[in-house]
Image (cartoon, rainbow, N blue to C red):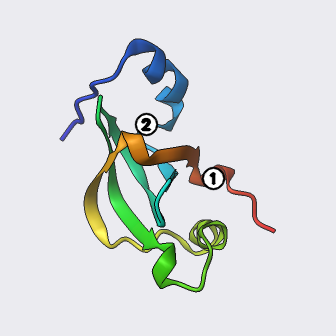
């Protein structure tokens, strides 16, 4: 089943290498999302096979949680999540997370 991409050309060029890959989406909220980037729309970013992590409910900081996800794998707790783009602070490839 293919994904439909609804993006502006410039935005797609900037993140095209991330589509279909595992990413970390940090937000301006306590929530952190780790999963496969499948769609970027005008208002939402869609991830599949996702771990939604609430840093308010965990002793692990967002950074430590990212490192653990890279080391041990993504703990999937959602099949699909749509994230409102206006709360996205950053997107990075999971493989780019530096372990320390």
Look at the picture and state if 17 lies above or below 66.
Answer: above
In the image: residue 56, left or right of residue 82: right
The x, y position of residue 96, in whole percent, is: 67, 50
Image marks 1 and 2: residues in contact by CB distance under 8 Å: no
Quarter of the image for residue 68 reads: bottom right
Q: Label 1: which residue?
A: 95
Q: Residue at x 32, y 45 (%)?
A: 84
Of all residues, the one furthest to the top in this rendering is 9
Q: Quadrant of the N terminus?
A: top left
Q: Position of residue 32 (x, y in %)?
A: 48, 62
Residue 54, numbered label: none
Does residue 82 appear to the left or right of 37 in the view shown?
left
Horizontal relation, residue 93 to residue 83: left or right = right
Crowd rating for badge 2 (residues with CA inside 10 Å; few <14, some 14–19, many 20+) = some
Circle 2 is placed at which residue position?
19
Q: What element does badge 1 sit on? A: helix
């Amino acid at each position: 089943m293919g994904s439909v991409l609804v993006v502006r050309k410039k935005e797609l060029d900037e993140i095209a290498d991330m589509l279909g890959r595992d990413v970390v989406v940090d937000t301006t909220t306590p929530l952190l999302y780790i999963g496969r980037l499948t769609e970027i729309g005008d208002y939402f970013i869609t991830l599949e096979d996702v771990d939604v992590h609430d840093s308010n409910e965990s002793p692990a900081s967002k950074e430590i949680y990212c490192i653990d996800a890279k080391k041990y794998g993504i703990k999937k707790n959602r099949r699909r999540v749509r994230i409102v783009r206006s709360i996205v602070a950053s997107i990075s490839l999971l493989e780019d997370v530096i372990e320390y």
